[in-house]
């Protein structure tokens, strides 16, 4: 397939391709998404094909006007309304009872659906011009780090999709917070830039699902099917390393400097003697979120066999950074 490259002003063209049943990679504020008409089952199957995505992993439906919410959901309870008022448009996805018109492939046969109103103006423009809600999983090959730059999308999906829209870099850098509103107490299934604290300020008590931190046990039932699969992993093997700067530096400096890469903080750099990539200040989780997927992809470009990722909880968005790192690392943690 010949992939068409579009600039941010060619949203008419992107929308036309989508209306005709094509698939188009689109920038959002979190990560790039791979879009299709949410009601066109054949177009949706093309997405699963292009990404190599397991068919039981449901998709998020994206809207660009709150008026369209009932095209997607059958119930929009008070807490959902409050969250929408506070955080939409923005990096929050809500799981709600689905409108029965939502195709099987979107919800993976479940009774619920994920819905998000992105803040990125290019994404909004394309959704509005397409005139239908769009499904958008992250625009990466299944299992690989998500794409936060135009170049990442081209690396993964060139020749597999109808078009890619260049919207520059995604400013959040990790995917939206996913919160289920199917029960009275909202439950976070995937942490993101909108933190548990942010949500609690808007709607009171929220829970964090155990799978956010813990490896699934064989056969364990999950609320979010995506959790079952390998995620965010570069070709290199990743280890999370916890410990002081001194211990971390001593540890990585003892490793083979031809095949190992230190994924470290800016503050670590003066002490590291092997090849390194910094993913931001240890005090700024937002910076780490912004750089994380690019850093994991860079490790592959550097032909790393092993990546040692220094992690420190700096509050706020740290939970979301850790959630991605621990999956990239296949839950392998070294405590120094
Ligand atoms: O920021 C984002 O959310 C990006 C941008 C493009 O909008 N999209 C994204 O989609 O991250 P994806 O498909 O890569 O991740 C969606 C996650 C998956 O873990 C999936 O299992 C979960 O949301 N999900 C989707 N529908 C669900 C549902 N009905 N119930 C529970 N989990 C659901
Ligand atoms: Mg994804």
Image (spheres, rainbow, N blue to C red):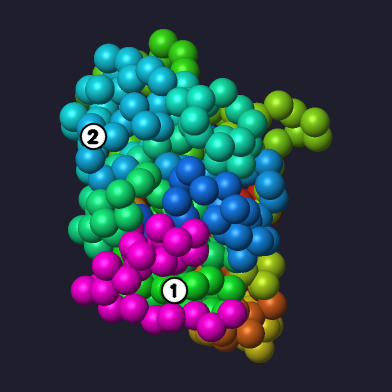
Return the residue found at the far top.
184
Give the magenta range.
1-28
Q: Quadrant of residue 121?
A: bottom left
Callout 2: SS: helix
> Where residue 298 sits: x, y (%)?
51, 79
Is residue 250 depicted above or below 244 in this figure? Answer: below
Magenta-colored stretch includes residue 281: no
Residue 319 against residue 45 in the figure, above or below? above
Q: Residues within 10 Å of mark 2 (few under 14, many from 20)?
A: some
Residue at x 61% of width, y 27% of height: 110
Q: Is 163 located above or below residue 219 in the figure?
A: below
Residue 141 in view, yes or no: yes
What residue sits 41% from the left and 14% below the top?
185
Looking at marks 1 and 2 on the same chain, the residue that comes earlier in the sequence is marked by: 2
| Residue depicted at x 45% and y 61% | 20
Which quadrant, please, contains the C terminus? bottom right
Q: Name the residue under label 2.
A: 66
Q: What residue sits right under mark 1 in the picture? A: 163
Instruction: Please rate how many residues cluster around mark 1, counting C-alpha atoms within 10 Å: few if below 14, some from 14 to 19, many from 20.
Output: many
254 with respect to 290 (left or right) = right
- Report the front residue among 36 and 33: 36
What's the residue at 41%, 11% (across, down)?
184
Element under disc 1: strand
Residue 16 is marked as none
Q: Distance between the residues labelled 1 and 2?
A: 27 Å
For the N terminus, give its image quadrant.
bottom right
Above/below status of 265 relative to 212: below
Farthest residue to the bottom: give it.
258
Q: Is residue 22 magenta?
A: yes
- Does any atom of ligand 1 lie closer than 8 Å to the CB of label 2? no
């Amino acid at each position: 397939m010949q992939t068409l490259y579009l600039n941010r002003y060619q949203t008419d063209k992107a929308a036309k391709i989508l209306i005709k049943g094509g698939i188009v990679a689109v920038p959002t504020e979190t990560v790039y998404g791979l879009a299709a008409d949410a009601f066109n089952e054949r177009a949706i199957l093309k997405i699963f094909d292009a990404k190599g995505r397991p068919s039981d992993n449901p998709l998020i439906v994206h809207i660009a006007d709150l008026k369209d919410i009932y095209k997607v959901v059958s119930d929009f309870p008070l807490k959902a309304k409050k969250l929408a008022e506070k955080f939409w448009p923005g990096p929050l996805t809500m799981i709600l009872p689905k409108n029965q018109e939502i195709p099987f492939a979107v919800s993976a046969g479940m009774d619920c659906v994920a819905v998000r109103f992105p803040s990125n103006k290019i994404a909004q423009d394309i959704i509005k011009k397409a005139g239908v809600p769009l499904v958008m999983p992250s625009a990466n090959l299944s299992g690989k780090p998500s794409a936060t730059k135009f170049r990442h999308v081209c690396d993964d999906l060139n020749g597999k999709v109808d078009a890619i829209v260049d919207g520059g870099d995604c400013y959040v850098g990790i995917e939206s917070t996913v919160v289920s509103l199917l029960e009275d107490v909202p439950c976070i299934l995937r942490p993101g830039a909108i933190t548990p604290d942010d949500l609690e300020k808007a709607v009171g008590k929220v829970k964090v699902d155990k799978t956010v931190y813990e490896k699934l046990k064989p056969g364990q039932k999950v609320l979010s099917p995506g959790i079952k699969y390998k995620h965010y992993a570069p070709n290199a093997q990743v280890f999370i390393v916890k410990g002081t700067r001194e211990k971390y530096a001593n540890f990585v400096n003892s490793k083979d400097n031809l095949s190992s890469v230190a994924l470290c903080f800016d503050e670590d750099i003066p002490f590291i003697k092997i090849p390194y990539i910094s993913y931001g200040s240890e005090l700024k989780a937002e910076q780490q979120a912004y750089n994380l997927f690019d850093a994991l992809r860079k490790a592959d470009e550097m032909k790393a066999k092993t990546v040692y990722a220094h992690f420190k909880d700096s509050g706020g968005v740290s939970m979301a950074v850790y959630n991605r790192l621990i999956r990239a690392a296949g839950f392998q943690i070294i405590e120094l």
